[in-house]
Amino acid sequence: MLPEPYTRREYVSAFRELAARIAASLKDVAPSALPIQMYVAGGSALHFHTGARVSVDIDATFSRRIALPDRLEVAYRDEDGAARLLYFDRQYNDTLGLMHEDAYADSLPLTLTGIDPQVLDVRILTPLDLAVSKLGRFSDQDQADIAALARRGLIDATSLESRATEAIGGYVGDKTRLRGNITSAKKSVKANSPRR
């Protein structure tokens, strides 16, 4: 999958630079351990799907435990000339949010010039799994991101409810708040989906 025309070239270049630094740090890894999958979630995945906003950080996990290199931030100028910084979030953790057990297996490849997918296979969550991942915290930003996915016609309320309900099955504890978030998200998706 290639970045869509509505992504910002400057942001994609900064993202590519960070991915290249991670890939370069894998040069001495035994071929039998490669490729390493990098699963991108959060605002970066949202940007590649919708162009809706530019994230300041990259939320990602990997298929193996890796020793990340230093200098995982890139300063760049946005298309309007504003100074921006993109950094890899070393604190991102996917265990506290809502994530479907097949989210990584179903993720989409992201083709980036200069990144060998046989070394670092960069992948982004599908729009549906990205929306599900936003239901755990369900902040104002998460709700806006789900609405942006709906406006692009990338998710529908029925599929979101189904995938999220399947995801909840793998969690323990009081799920009342999560179920309420699903109900609210369904309403938002219906309200923001393109009219047919």
Image: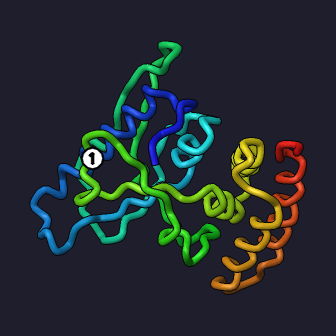
Q: Is residue 104 left or right of residue 121?
A: right
Q: Residue furthest front?
A: 196
Look at the picture and state if 151 lies above or below 179.
Answer: above
Q: Which structural element holds mark 1?
A: loop
Where in the figure is residue 57, as x and y percent of width and height? 47, 43
Where in the figure is residue 164, as x and y percent of width and height? 72, 71
Residue at left offset 48%, top offset 58%: 108
Residue at left offset 64%, top offset 36%: 52
- Nearest to the observer: residue 54 or residue 102: 102
- Disc 1 target residue: 115
Look at the picture and state if 148 lies above or below 42.
Answer: above
Given the image, on which type of amino acid does mark 1 rest?
A: Ile
| Rendered image quadrant of residue 26 | bottom left
Q: Quadrant of the C terminus?
A: top right
Using a 10 Å C-alpha cutoff, classify the residue at mark 1 as few (fewer than 14 neighbours), some (14 to 19) or many (20 or more). many
Where in the figure is residue 16, as x and y percent of width and height? 34, 39
Look at the picture and state if 69 lies above or below 85.
Answer: below
Residue at left offset 36%, top offset 70%: 63
Residue at left offset 53%, top offset 31%: 5
Where in the figure is residue 100, as x and y percent of width and height? 61, 74
Q: Is residue 112 left or right of residue 135?
A: left
